[in-house]
């Protein structure tokens, strides 16, 4: 992991710590102690198990080579071309076409693809998509992306709890202002979650596109794959998971219908495709 990504990881875990302690303080000393213990567990879990949490969230199962030879073939070929260890290959039971990479480092990396992406992409297009995911592994940003997704999801959940607590909790606490604090927290947490996603710069997608295309020496295949994915996601978006982890995927797997879609997690497919088709090999 680069020093830059180590720094970002530390910042994200610090944000999680500060937020939980702030919420705990609203409920007195007992709440603060509980929050301190909980955030300690969360920080440990985020670092060591965030990739497993994300795979569980998307119901991903380790793929059998006999059942998904097309996916394994693409992963093996890209592994050889990129000179990276063969990652574990997972399949997501969804017809929404997409893929992502996760893990702490190249030695324990995972590449996950949906059933839907295997149906709509040609062999060359799938190979280009897998090369894009291998680029994230090579650039060692898979850990920071996964931790960011996990933390954004937790923060979104905190916001939901704060809103419910404000609606149904007592407004007559001894210190006063608890109700207002919860309302403010409930409003701000979705924005904080979105900003955490944006902390994972969208420039990393352009870089992964470029490295992936150069790995397979084919920018056109990746450009076409991205266009197919976007078109089919509009028709068949992901039915489970959370928008807090949208930045993990090669393309946003959810329809952009909410206010938070203003905080785009990916560059536009049009701009990505134009760059890829302009590449020379």
Image: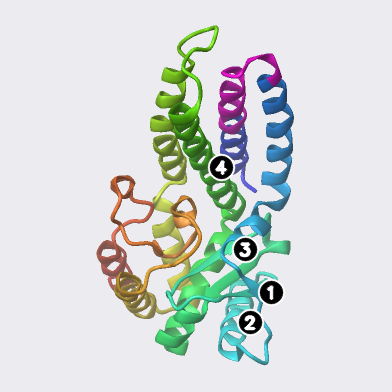
Pointer 3 residue: 55
264, 166: nearer the viewer: 166
The answer to whether residue 269 is left or right of residue 175 is left
Q: Are marks 3 and 2 in contact (CB under 8 Å)?
A: no
Q: How far from the left and from the top, in percent, is residue 35?
A: 67, 27
Reply above or below: 149 against 20.
Answer: below
Gap between marks 4 and 2 measured at Cα: 35 Å
Gap between marks 3 and 1 measured at Cα: 18 Å
Q: How far from the left and from the top, in percent, is residue 3?
A: 62, 40
Q: Earlier in the sequence, mark 4 or mark 2?
A: 2
Pointer 2 residue: 76
Pointer 4 residue: 154
Gap between marks 2 and 1 measured at Cα: 6 Å
SS for tag 4? helix
Q: Residue at x 42, y 58 (%)?
A: 205
Q: Earlier in the sequence, mark 3 or mark 2?
A: 3
SS for tag 1? loop
Coloring scheme used: rainbow
Nearer mark to the viewer, of 4 and 3? 4
Nearer mark to the viewer, of 4 and 2? 4
Q: Are marks 2 and 1 in contact (CB under 8 Å)?
A: yes
Q: Earlier in the sequence, mark 4 or mark 3?
A: 3
The answer to whether residue 65 is left or right of residue 256 is right
Q: Earlier in the sequence, mark 3 or mark 1?
A: 3
Marker disc for residue 86: 1
**Residue 281 visible in the shown view:** no
Nearer mark to the viewer, of 3 and 1? 3
Magenta stretch bounds? 15-30
């Amino acid at each position: 992991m680069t020093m830059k990504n180590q720094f970002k990881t530390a910042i994200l875990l610090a944000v999680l710590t500060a937020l939980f302690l702030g919420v705990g303080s609203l409920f007195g000393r007992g709440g603060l102690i509980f929050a301190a213990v909980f955030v300690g567990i969360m920080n440990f879990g985020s670092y060591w198990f965030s990739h497993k949490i994300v795979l569980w969230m998307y119901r991903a199962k380790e793929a059998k080579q006999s059942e998904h030879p097309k996916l394994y073939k693409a992963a093996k070929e890209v592994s050889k071309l990129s000179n990276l260890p063969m990652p574990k290959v997972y399949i997501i039971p969804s017809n929404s076409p997409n893929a992502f990479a996760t893990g702490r480092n190249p030695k324990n990396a995972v590449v996950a693809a949906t059933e839907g992406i295997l149906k709509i992409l040609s062999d060359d297009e799938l190979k280009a998509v897998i090369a894009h995911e291998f680029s994230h592994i090579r650039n060692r940003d898979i850990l920071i992306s996964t931790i960011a997704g996990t933390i954004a999801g937790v923060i979104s959940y905190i916001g939901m709890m704060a809103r419910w607590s404000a609606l149904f909790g007592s407004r007559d606490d001894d210190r006063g202002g608890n109700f207002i604090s919860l309302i403010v927290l409930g409003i701000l947490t979705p924005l904080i979650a979105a900003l955490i996603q944006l902390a994972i710069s969208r420039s990393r997608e352009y870089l992964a596109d470029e490295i992936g295309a150069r790995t397979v020496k084919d920018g056109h295949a990746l450009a076409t794959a991205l266009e197919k994915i976007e078109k089919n996601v509009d028709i068949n978006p992901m039915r489970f998971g959370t928008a807090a982890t949208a930045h993990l995927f090669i393309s946003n797997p959810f329809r952009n219908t909410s206010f938070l879609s203003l905080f785009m997690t990916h560059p536009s497919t049009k701009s990505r495709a134009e760059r890829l088709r302009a590449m020379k090999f």
